[in-house]
Image: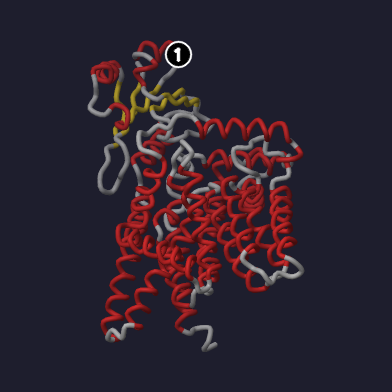
Amino acid sequence: MSSLWSTPSLGLYLALFAAALLRVWSLGAHLPFSPGVDEPEVMERAVRIMKTGDFNPHFFDYPSLYLYIEAVASTLRFLCGAVQGRWSALAQAPTEEFYLWGRAVTAVFGTATVWLLHRAGLYWGRRTALLAAVMLAVMPLHVRESHYTLTDVPSTFFVTLSLLLSLRAHDKATTWSFALAGAAAGLAGATKYNAGLAVIMPLVAAVMTPAVRPARGAAILWVLISTLIAFLVAAPYTLLDLPHFLNGFAYLAGAYRAPANTADPGWFVYLKLLRASLQWPGTFIVLSGLVLAGVRLARGPDRIKWTLPLVFSILYFYFVAHQNIYYGRYLLPIVPPLSLLGAAGILWIFDTMRARHAPAAARQVVTAVITLLVVVPPAYTSIAFNGLEARVWTTEQAYRWILATLPKGSTICIEGSVTFQLPPAYKSTHVVQLPRKGDAASFKRDGVQYLVASSQQYGSQGPEYQRLFAETKELARFAPSDDHPGPELRILQVP
């Protein structure tokens, strides 16, 4: 019992508690009326698999492993709902009832990644492992994306698992251990295609392990075989529905090669996104960790443990930076290895001061200050994100007002594709801007009874909006405030 609550163990438990808290806080924000971007792509298909028993996703923008995981979670949710009397048939359970459980699965993956990173960090020592775990626990980018039913956080889990198993395979030096590391990389690729680049870590580990039993070539071969097998087992319709997979993959690849929507190059966009998540102190510390890894790679000792996170981070960053669709969440697979190198950089500063016989008090102060600068700003940003998401937004106010006030079957045109989604009981459509569809008379001819206008679109109210507001009757207005963030929304009745 004493070892269970020793200082290192207690530190890990606190880091895991903080990670879980930050990832489940405000987990149900904006549900069911406004799921996050691309969440419906996952949940609609996961629920369809549950309802039809057809495991072919008929969708290949993402591999199918996470769709299957969410289908399992949706099945459990349905069973619990049936026991509670919420529904007596699958047809009675709409997709929006499954989002919260789906998000909880992602939060579990996010929290578990912190534990995996700690295990990998033990190859650098207990202090590095704990600090790396704390850095990832409070990392805003990872905290935010752990709130959504998307593939990025689960794929990051499998990438981190591959890193851990690759380090372990180097120690064990057996083909079986390398095969396990390759299988983890295959699962990463079966969750999100680009995460399959994790296979570089067991391959590099096999190359850098001369004493592999029975031979280094056999270890490399088994890494490739296990990666492929794990990918096909977790995403079988890649092969079973090969024509549709190839068509979908080619379309997706073309989309990522389309002209970029920003003048800045991809590498610059992603560097800014990383800097925003790490904050300036964390950015400098991670840079110091990268430099330290480069030095250790060139000079030693323990080249292998520095090579794996460094090489993967560089290659993965190069890959995503040369695509023309930019999302911050695409960087998630390199966040754990960067946290690990950043933690190693901090401890290197401490050990350098000790080697130069700096006073103990000075060492402790410097290390404490640097650690706080690296941990506190990201933690504050993550807490602020959750606090903001937990408030009642204007979109929720408008959504609740419509459900309570307007009769079911009403025809409603909503401005802005991300404002909110109404239940099927309402005949709702979405347009980018209301005036583009026409004036009040045009809406009336189309049978539209109500409009929802958003300040994200009408802004300072140009003449076309002023005319539309004059031609319709305003029923309700929801203005943003400190307690109710979001756009100003106006609900209008077509005369």
Q: Closer to the camera, 128 or 148? A: 128
User: Measured along the vertical axis of the image, is residue 194 above or below residue 120?
Assistant: above
Foreground residue among 234 and 68? 234
Residue 342 drawn at (x, y percent) = 40, 65
The residue sitting at the bottom extreme is 2
Give residue 226's position: percent from left, percent from top: 72, 56
> Residue 359 at x, y = what percent?
27, 86
Residue 58 is situated, as x and y percent measured from the top left of the image, at 67, 35
Q: Amino acid at mark 1?
A: Asp
Depicted 406 relative to depicted 94: above or below:
above
- Is residue 85 visible in the rendered image? The answer is no
The quadrant of the image that shows the C terminus is top left
Q: Secondary structure at mark 1?
A: loop
Q: Residue at x 67, y 39 (%)?
A: 57
Query: In front here: 112 or 219?
Result: 219
**At 46% from the left edge and 79% from the top edge, which residue is drawn?**
10
- Look at mark 1 in the image and give the residue it sits on: 446
Q: Determine whether, in the image, residue 417 is placed left or right of residue 483.
A: right
Q: Quadrant of the N terminus?
A: bottom right
> Up-down: is 324 above or below 139?
above
Residue 390 appears left or right of 329:
left
Q: Nearer the viewer, residue 412 or 320?
A: 320
Is residue 3 depicted above or below 427 in this figure?
below
